[in-house]
Amino acid sequence: MTAPSEPAPSSIPRLIAVLSVAGFASTFAGRSVEPLVGVLSRDLGSDAHTVALLSTAFALPYALIQPILGPVGDALGKERVVTVCLGVLALALVGCTLAPDIGLLFGLRILAGAAAGGVIPLALALMGDRVPFAVRQVAISRFLVAVILGQLSGSTFAGLIEGQVGWRGVFAITALVGLLGCAAALFGFERIGGAPPRRPEFRQALARYRTILANPRARVLFTAVFVEAIAIFGVFPYLAPLLEARGQGGPREAGLVLAGFAAGGLIYSFLVGLLLRFLGMTRMLVAGGAICAGALLVVGLAGRWQVDCAALLALGLGFYMLHNTFQVQVTEVAPGARASAVALHAFSYFCGQALGVAILGAAIQGLGQFAALAACAAIILATGLASAHLLARPVPPGA
Protein backbone atom coordinates (compact mmCIF):
# COMPACT_ATOMS: atom_id res chain seq x y z
CA MET A 1 0.00 0.00 0.00
CA THR A 2 1.16 3.53 -0.69
CA ALA A 3 0.78 6.47 1.61
CA PRO A 4 -1.91 8.97 0.65
CA SER A 5 -0.73 12.00 -1.25
CA GLU A 6 -0.30 15.23 0.63
CA PRO A 7 -2.46 18.26 -0.25
CA ALA A 8 -1.36 21.75 -0.99
CA PRO A 9 -0.25 23.59 2.18
CA SER A 10 -3.15 26.04 1.78
CA SER A 11 -5.66 23.27 2.58
CA ILE A 12 -4.00 22.30 5.86
CA PRO A 13 -5.34 25.20 8.01
CA ARG A 14 -8.89 24.51 6.83
CA LEU A 15 -8.52 20.80 7.62
CA ILE A 16 -7.22 21.53 11.11
CA ALA A 17 -10.03 24.05 11.73
CA VAL A 18 -12.77 21.56 10.81
CA LEU A 19 -11.15 18.74 12.79
CA SER A 20 -10.72 21.08 15.75
CA VAL A 21 -14.46 21.79 15.92
CA ALA A 22 -15.17 18.06 15.66
CA GLY A 23 -12.60 17.18 18.33
CA PHE A 24 -13.93 19.87 20.65
CA ALA A 25 -17.47 18.48 20.38
CA SER A 26 -16.41 14.91 21.16
CA THR A 27 -14.30 15.73 24.22
CA PHE A 28 -16.81 18.27 25.52
CA ALA A 29 -19.34 15.42 25.68
CA GLY A 30 -16.92 12.93 27.19
CA ARG A 31 -15.67 15.01 30.10
CA SER A 32 -18.90 16.74 31.14
CA VAL A 33 -20.16 13.82 33.26
CA GLU A 34 -17.25 13.59 35.71
CA PRO A 35 -18.10 16.59 37.95
CA LEU A 36 -21.73 15.38 38.11
CA VAL A 37 -21.08 12.02 39.80
CA GLY A 38 -22.35 13.14 43.21
CA VAL A 39 -25.42 14.90 41.79
CA LEU A 40 -26.38 11.97 39.55
CA SER A 41 -25.91 9.59 42.46
CA ARG A 42 -28.40 11.51 44.60
CA ASP A 43 -30.95 12.28 41.85
CA LEU A 44 -31.03 8.77 40.35
CA GLY A 45 -30.73 6.89 43.65
CA SER A 46 -27.49 5.08 42.82
CA ASP A 47 -24.16 4.52 44.56
CA ALA A 48 -21.40 7.01 43.66
CA HIS A 49 -18.99 4.19 42.68
CA THR A 50 -21.64 2.89 40.26
CA VAL A 51 -22.28 6.33 38.77
CA ALA A 52 -18.52 6.83 38.35
CA LEU A 53 -18.63 3.92 35.92
CA LEU A 54 -20.49 6.19 33.48
CA SER A 55 -16.96 7.17 32.45
CA THR A 56 -16.24 3.51 31.71
CA ALA A 57 -19.55 3.27 29.83
CA PHE A 58 -18.23 6.00 27.51
CA ALA A 59 -14.60 4.90 27.26
CA LEU A 60 -15.01 1.13 26.78
CA PRO A 61 -17.23 1.27 23.65
CA TYR A 62 -14.97 4.06 22.41
CA ALA A 63 -12.16 1.51 22.58
CA LEU A 64 -14.03 -1.54 21.33
CA ILE A 65 -15.35 0.22 18.21
CA GLN A 66 -11.86 1.11 17.01
CA PRO A 67 -10.99 -2.16 15.21
CA ILE A 68 -14.20 -1.70 13.20
CA LEU A 69 -13.99 2.04 12.51
CA GLY A 70 -10.35 1.84 11.42
CA PRO A 71 -10.99 -0.24 8.29
CA VAL A 72 -14.34 1.48 7.72
CA GLY A 73 -12.55 4.84 7.69
CA ASP A 74 -9.90 3.53 5.29
CA ALA A 75 -12.60 2.13 2.97
CA LEU A 76 -15.39 4.73 3.02
CA GLY A 77 -13.37 7.85 3.65
CA LYS A 78 -12.37 9.27 7.00
CA GLU A 79 -14.33 12.50 6.48
CA ARG A 80 -17.60 10.63 5.91
CA VAL A 81 -17.17 8.45 8.96
CA VAL A 82 -16.28 11.43 11.20
CA THR A 83 -19.44 13.26 10.05
CA VAL A 84 -21.78 10.31 10.66
CA CYS A 85 -20.24 9.61 14.07
CA LEU A 86 -20.78 13.21 15.17
CA GLY A 87 -24.44 12.97 14.15
CA VAL A 88 -24.95 9.78 16.18
CA LEU A 89 -23.12 11.34 19.13
CA ALA A 90 -25.47 14.34 19.12
CA LEU A 91 -28.56 12.09 19.03
CA ALA A 92 -27.25 9.97 21.92
CA LEU A 93 -26.66 13.12 23.98
CA VAL A 94 -30.22 14.27 23.30
CA GLY A 95 -31.33 10.91 24.71
CA CYS A 96 -29.18 11.43 27.83
CA THR A 97 -31.08 14.65 28.46
CA LEU A 98 -34.34 12.68 28.67
CA ALA A 99 -33.08 9.53 30.44
CA PRO A 100 -35.46 8.62 33.32
CA ASP A 101 -33.11 6.27 35.19
CA ILE A 102 -29.49 5.23 35.59
CA GLY A 103 -29.92 2.12 33.42
CA LEU A 104 -31.00 4.00 30.30
CA LEU A 105 -28.37 6.66 30.96
CA PHE A 106 -25.71 3.93 30.93
CA GLY A 107 -27.05 2.63 27.61
CA LEU A 108 -27.00 6.07 26.01
CA ARG A 109 -23.49 6.77 27.28
CA ILE A 110 -22.40 3.51 25.65
CA LEU A 111 -23.85 4.68 22.33
CA ALA A 112 -22.27 8.13 22.75
CA GLY A 113 -18.87 6.60 23.50
CA ALA A 114 -19.00 4.35 20.44
CA ALA A 115 -19.91 7.33 18.23
CA ALA A 116 -17.22 9.57 19.73
CA GLY A 117 -14.74 6.82 18.94
CA GLY A 118 -14.95 7.75 15.28
CA VAL A 119 -13.84 11.37 15.70
CA ILE A 120 -10.40 11.96 17.23
CA PRO A 121 -8.67 8.76 16.03
CA LEU A 122 -9.78 9.35 12.43
CA ALA A 123 -8.89 13.03 12.76
CA LEU A 124 -5.35 12.03 13.70
CA ALA A 125 -5.25 9.61 10.77
CA LEU A 126 -6.42 12.38 8.42
CA MET A 127 -3.64 14.64 9.64
CA GLY A 128 -1.21 11.79 9.13
CA ASP A 129 -2.45 11.55 5.53
CA ARG A 130 -2.40 15.25 4.74
CA VAL A 131 0.16 17.01 6.93
CA PRO A 132 3.89 16.56 6.14
CA PHE A 133 5.78 14.74 8.89
CA ALA A 134 8.20 17.63 9.42
CA VAL A 135 5.41 19.83 10.78
CA ARG A 136 3.01 17.14 12.00
CA GLN A 137 3.79 17.26 15.74
CA VAL A 138 3.14 21.00 15.83
CA ALA A 139 -0.02 20.59 13.68
CA ILE A 140 -1.35 17.84 15.95
CA SER A 141 -0.59 19.97 18.98
CA ARG A 142 -2.71 22.76 17.45
CA PHE A 143 -5.55 20.30 16.96
CA LEU A 144 -5.04 19.24 20.57
CA VAL A 145 -5.73 22.81 21.68
CA ALA A 146 -9.35 22.32 20.57
CA VAL A 147 -9.51 18.84 22.11
CA ILE A 148 -8.13 20.17 25.39
CA LEU A 149 -10.48 23.16 25.32
CA GLY A 150 -13.31 20.63 24.99
CA GLN A 151 -12.06 18.86 28.10
CA LEU A 152 -11.55 22.15 29.92
CA SER A 153 -14.92 23.66 29.08
CA GLY A 154 -16.80 20.34 29.39
CA SER A 155 -15.69 19.59 32.93
CA THR A 156 -15.59 23.20 34.15
CA PHE A 157 -18.88 24.15 32.51
CA ALA A 158 -20.67 21.10 33.92
CA GLY A 159 -19.46 21.83 37.43
CA LEU A 160 -20.24 25.55 37.33
CA ILE A 161 -23.63 25.54 35.62
CA GLU A 162 -25.22 22.39 37.05
CA GLY A 163 -26.71 24.39 39.91
CA GLN A 164 -28.58 26.63 37.45
CA VAL A 165 -29.73 24.18 34.74
CA GLY A 166 -29.44 20.77 36.41
CA TRP A 167 -27.66 17.76 34.98
CA ARG A 168 -30.28 17.41 32.23
CA GLY A 169 -29.53 20.95 31.10
CA VAL A 170 -25.83 20.10 30.99
CA PHE A 171 -26.53 17.13 28.70
CA ALA A 172 -28.78 19.30 26.51
CA ILE A 173 -25.97 21.77 25.92
CA THR A 174 -23.50 18.97 25.14
CA ALA A 175 -26.01 17.73 22.53
CA LEU A 176 -26.12 21.20 20.95
CA VAL A 177 -22.32 21.29 20.78
CA GLY A 178 -22.38 17.85 19.14
CA LEU A 179 -24.80 19.12 16.49
CA LEU A 180 -22.51 22.07 15.77
CA GLY A 181 -19.58 19.67 15.36
CA CYS A 182 -21.60 17.56 12.92
CA ALA A 183 -22.52 20.66 10.89
CA ALA A 184 -18.89 21.76 10.72
CA ALA A 185 -17.84 18.36 9.39
CA LEU A 186 -20.76 18.14 6.97
CA PHE A 187 -20.10 21.50 5.33
CA GLY A 188 -16.47 22.23 6.13
CA PHE A 189 -14.39 19.37 4.78
CA GLU A 190 -12.54 20.22 1.57
CA ARG A 191 -12.86 17.17 -0.65
CA ILE A 192 -9.49 16.11 -1.97
CA GLY A 193 -9.19 13.57 -4.75
CA GLY A 194 -8.38 10.03 -3.70
CA ALA A 195 -9.62 6.49 -3.91
CA PRO A 196 -13.42 6.19 -4.26
CA PRO A 197 -15.43 4.61 -1.41
CA ARG A 198 -15.32 0.83 -1.36
CA ARG A 199 -16.72 -2.00 0.70
CA PRO A 200 -14.77 -2.45 3.96
CA GLU A 201 -12.62 -5.57 3.72
CA PHE A 202 -12.52 -6.86 7.27
CA ARG A 203 -10.47 -9.91 6.34
CA GLN A 204 -7.85 -7.61 4.89
CA ALA A 205 -8.20 -5.43 7.96
CA LEU A 206 -7.34 -8.36 10.21
CA ALA A 207 -4.28 -9.04 8.11
CA ARG A 208 -3.38 -5.34 8.32
CA TYR A 209 -3.77 -5.40 12.11
CA ARG A 210 -1.51 -8.45 12.32
CA THR A 211 1.09 -6.65 10.22
CA ILE A 212 0.91 -3.55 12.40
CA LEU A 213 1.16 -5.59 15.61
CA ALA A 214 4.19 -7.41 14.22
CA ASN A 215 6.02 -4.07 14.32
CA PRO A 216 7.89 -3.87 17.68
CA ARG A 217 7.59 -0.08 17.69
CA ALA A 218 3.81 -0.33 17.40
CA ARG A 219 3.66 -2.74 20.35
CA VAL A 220 5.66 -0.30 22.47
CA LEU A 221 3.33 2.57 21.59
CA PHE A 222 0.11 0.62 22.18
CA THR A 223 1.33 -0.74 25.51
CA ALA A 224 2.52 2.68 26.64
CA VAL A 225 -0.81 4.42 26.02
CA PHE A 226 -2.72 1.56 27.67
CA VAL A 227 -0.67 1.83 30.88
CA GLU A 228 -0.63 5.63 30.71
CA ALA A 229 -4.43 5.79 30.60
CA ILE A 230 -4.85 3.48 33.61
CA ALA A 231 -2.35 5.41 35.72
CA ILE A 232 -3.62 8.92 34.91
CA PHE A 233 -7.34 8.78 34.16
CA GLY A 234 -8.57 6.22 36.69
CA VAL A 235 -8.91 8.81 39.44
CA PHE A 236 -10.84 11.42 37.43
CA PRO A 237 -14.43 10.25 38.13
CA TYR A 238 -13.63 9.90 41.85
CA LEU A 239 -12.38 13.45 42.34
CA ALA A 240 -15.87 14.86 42.99
CA PRO A 241 -16.85 12.28 45.68
CA LEU A 242 -13.37 12.47 47.27
CA LEU A 243 -13.60 16.27 47.52
CA GLU A 244 -17.09 16.02 49.01
CA ALA A 245 -15.95 13.38 51.53
CA ARG A 246 -13.27 15.66 52.96
CA GLY A 247 -15.44 18.79 52.90
CA GLN A 248 -13.66 20.49 50.01
CA GLY A 249 -16.70 21.19 47.85
CA GLY A 250 -18.98 19.63 45.24
CA PRO A 251 -19.46 19.78 41.45
CA ARG A 252 -18.15 23.34 41.17
CA GLU A 253 -14.82 22.57 42.86
CA ALA A 254 -14.49 19.24 41.06
CA GLY A 255 -15.02 20.98 37.73
CA LEU A 256 -12.32 23.53 38.52
CA VAL A 257 -9.88 20.81 39.61
CA LEU A 258 -10.50 18.88 36.39
CA ALA A 259 -10.06 22.10 34.44
CA GLY A 260 -6.51 22.24 35.78
CA PHE A 261 -5.66 19.15 33.74
CA ALA A 262 -6.89 20.75 30.52
CA ALA A 263 -5.08 23.99 31.36
CA GLY A 264 -1.86 22.01 31.65
CA GLY A 265 -2.53 20.61 28.20
CA LEU A 266 -2.97 24.12 26.83
CA ILE A 267 0.36 25.14 28.33
CA TYR A 268 1.93 22.17 26.56
CA SER A 269 0.37 23.10 23.23
CA PHE A 270 1.82 26.61 23.44
CA LEU A 271 5.27 25.38 24.52
CA VAL A 272 5.53 22.34 22.26
CA GLY A 273 7.91 23.99 19.80
CA LEU A 274 10.34 24.99 22.55
CA LEU A 275 10.02 21.64 24.31
CA LEU A 276 10.85 19.77 21.10
CA ARG A 277 13.82 22.01 20.44
CA PHE A 278 15.36 21.73 23.91
CA LEU A 279 14.29 18.25 25.01
CA GLY A 280 13.78 16.11 21.93
CA MET A 281 11.65 12.99 22.01
CA THR A 282 13.60 10.95 24.58
CA ARG A 283 13.91 13.61 27.26
CA MET A 284 10.32 14.74 26.56
CA LEU A 285 9.09 11.27 27.57
CA VAL A 286 11.29 11.08 30.67
CA ALA A 287 10.26 14.56 31.83
CA GLY A 288 6.58 13.90 31.12
CA GLY A 289 6.61 10.72 33.21
CA ALA A 290 8.38 12.46 36.10
CA ILE A 291 5.98 15.43 36.10
CA CYS A 292 2.95 13.11 36.08
CA ALA A 293 4.36 11.04 38.95
CA GLY A 294 4.93 14.11 41.13
CA ALA A 295 1.44 15.45 40.41
CA LEU A 296 -0.24 12.16 41.32
CA LEU A 297 1.61 12.07 44.63
CA VAL A 298 0.34 15.56 45.45
CA VAL A 299 -3.26 14.54 44.69
CA GLY A 300 -2.77 11.46 46.85
CA LEU A 301 -1.93 13.65 49.86
CA ALA A 302 -5.57 14.89 49.84
CA GLY A 303 -4.98 18.55 50.59
CA ARG A 304 -7.13 21.55 49.69
CA TRP A 305 -8.95 21.57 46.37
CA GLN A 306 -6.81 24.48 45.15
CA VAL A 307 -3.69 22.32 45.63
CA ASP A 308 -5.37 19.51 43.70
CA CYS A 309 -6.11 21.98 40.91
CA ALA A 310 -2.44 22.98 40.69
CA ALA A 311 -1.43 19.30 40.70
CA LEU A 312 -3.88 18.54 37.88
CA LEU A 313 -2.37 21.39 35.87
CA ALA A 314 1.06 19.76 36.20
CA LEU A 315 -0.50 16.38 35.42
CA GLY A 316 -1.98 17.77 32.19
CA LEU A 317 1.38 19.20 31.11
CA GLY A 318 3.19 15.93 31.81
CA PHE A 319 0.49 13.80 30.21
CA TYR A 320 0.55 15.68 26.91
CA MET A 321 4.35 15.58 26.84
CA LEU A 322 3.96 11.81 26.86
CA HIS A 323 0.80 11.37 24.85
CA ASN A 324 1.42 13.80 21.99
CA THR A 325 4.80 12.15 21.41
CA PHE A 326 3.10 8.75 21.22
CA GLN A 327 0.44 10.12 18.85
CA VAL A 328 2.98 11.49 16.40
CA GLN A 329 4.99 8.27 16.41
CA VAL A 330 1.91 6.13 15.78
CA THR A 331 1.00 8.10 12.63
CA GLU A 332 4.18 6.70 11.04
CA VAL A 333 3.74 3.06 12.11
CA ALA A 334 1.76 2.20 8.94
CA PRO A 335 1.64 5.13 6.47
CA GLY A 336 -0.53 3.17 4.03
CA ALA A 337 -3.15 2.30 6.69
CA ARG A 338 -3.02 5.14 9.17
CA ALA A 339 -6.66 4.84 10.19
CA SER A 340 -6.07 1.22 11.20
CA ALA A 341 -2.89 2.06 13.12
CA VAL A 342 -4.49 4.97 14.92
CA ALA A 343 -7.55 2.80 15.63
CA LEU A 344 -5.39 0.24 17.44
CA HIS A 345 -3.72 3.08 19.31
CA ALA A 346 -7.11 4.48 20.41
CA PHE A 347 -8.32 0.97 21.26
CA SER A 348 -5.39 0.51 23.65
CA TYR A 349 -5.73 3.98 25.14
CA PHE A 350 -9.46 3.83 25.85
CA CYS A 351 -9.31 0.27 27.13
CA GLY A 352 -6.86 1.66 29.65
CA GLN A 353 -9.21 4.51 30.53
CA ALA A 354 -12.15 2.14 30.96
CA LEU A 355 -10.24 -0.33 33.12
CA GLY A 356 -8.53 2.42 35.07
CA VAL A 357 -11.80 3.61 36.63
CA ALA A 358 -12.59 0.14 37.98
CA ILE A 359 -9.00 -0.53 39.09
CA LEU A 360 -8.62 2.82 40.87
CA GLY A 361 -12.01 2.47 42.53
CA ALA A 362 -10.99 -0.89 44.01
CA ALA A 363 -7.54 0.41 44.94
CA ILE A 364 -8.88 3.49 46.71
CA GLN A 365 -11.34 1.38 48.70
CA GLY A 366 -8.75 -1.26 49.56
CA LEU A 367 -5.52 0.74 49.97
CA GLY A 368 -6.61 4.31 50.54
CA GLN A 369 -6.19 7.38 48.36
CA PHE A 370 -2.47 7.98 48.89
CA ALA A 371 -1.29 4.39 48.39
CA ALA A 372 -3.43 3.96 45.28
CA LEU A 373 -2.15 7.16 43.67
CA ALA A 374 1.45 6.48 44.75
CA ALA A 375 1.23 3.20 42.82
CA CYS A 376 -0.05 5.15 39.79
CA ALA A 377 2.86 7.58 40.17
CA ALA A 378 5.39 4.74 40.11
CA ILE A 379 3.73 3.19 37.06
CA ILE A 380 3.66 6.38 34.99
CA LEU A 381 7.29 7.20 35.86
CA ALA A 382 8.32 3.71 34.72
CA THR A 383 6.26 4.16 31.53
CA GLY A 384 8.06 7.38 30.65
CA LEU A 385 11.49 5.87 31.25
CA ALA A 386 10.80 2.61 29.43
CA SER A 387 9.14 4.20 26.39
CA ALA A 388 11.98 6.75 26.08
CA HIS A 389 14.52 3.92 26.00
CA LEU A 390 12.59 1.71 23.58
CA LEU A 391 11.50 4.42 21.14
CA ALA A 392 15.01 5.86 20.96
CA ARG A 393 16.11 2.74 19.11
CA PRO A 394 16.48 3.32 15.34
CA VAL A 395 13.64 2.10 13.14
CA PRO A 396 14.72 -1.09 11.30
CA PRO A 397 14.95 -0.74 7.50
CA GLY A 398 11.66 -1.63 5.83
CA ALA A 399 9.68 -1.45 9.08
Image: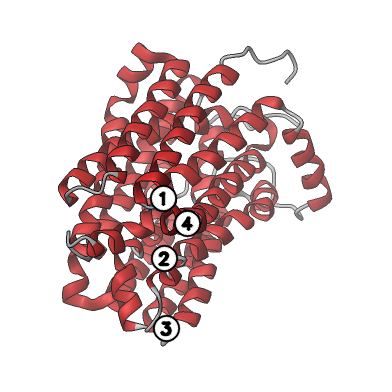
Taking the image as shown, residue 360 lies to the left or right of residue 128, namely left
Q: Position of residue 222 (x, y in %)?
A: 61, 37
Q: Position of residue 97 (x, y in %)?
A: 37, 79
Q: Residues within 10 Å of mark 1 (few under 14, many from 20)?
A: many
Q: Which residue is mark 1?
A: 23
Residue 8 makes an appearance in the image: no
Residue at the extreme bottom of the image, as rendered: 100
Of callouts 1 and 4, which one flags the residue occurring earlier in the amino acid sequence? 1
Of callouts 3 and 4, which one flags the residue occurring earlier in the amino acid sequence? 3
Q: Nearer the viewer, residue 17 or 62?
A: 62
- Which kind of residue does numbered mark 3 sit on? Ala
Badge 1 element: helix
Taking the image as shown, residue 128 lies to the left or right of residue 324, namely right
Colouring of the image: secondary structure
Q: Which residue is mark 3?
A: 99
220 lies above or below 347? above
Badge 4 element: helix
- Which kind of residue does numbered mark 4 sit on? Val
Q: Residues within 10 Å of mark 3 (few under 14, many from 20)?
A: some
Q: Nearer the viewer, mark 3 or mark 1?
A: 3
Badge 2 element: helix
Q: Which residue is mark 2?
A: 52
- Residue at 46% x, 56% y is 366
- Which kind of residue does numbered mark 2 sit on? Ala
Badge 3 element: loop
Q: Label 2 near label 4: C-beta < 8 Å?
A: yes
Q: CA distance from mark 3 to mark 4?
A: 23 Å
Taking the image as shown, residue 302 lies to the left or right of residue 65, namely left
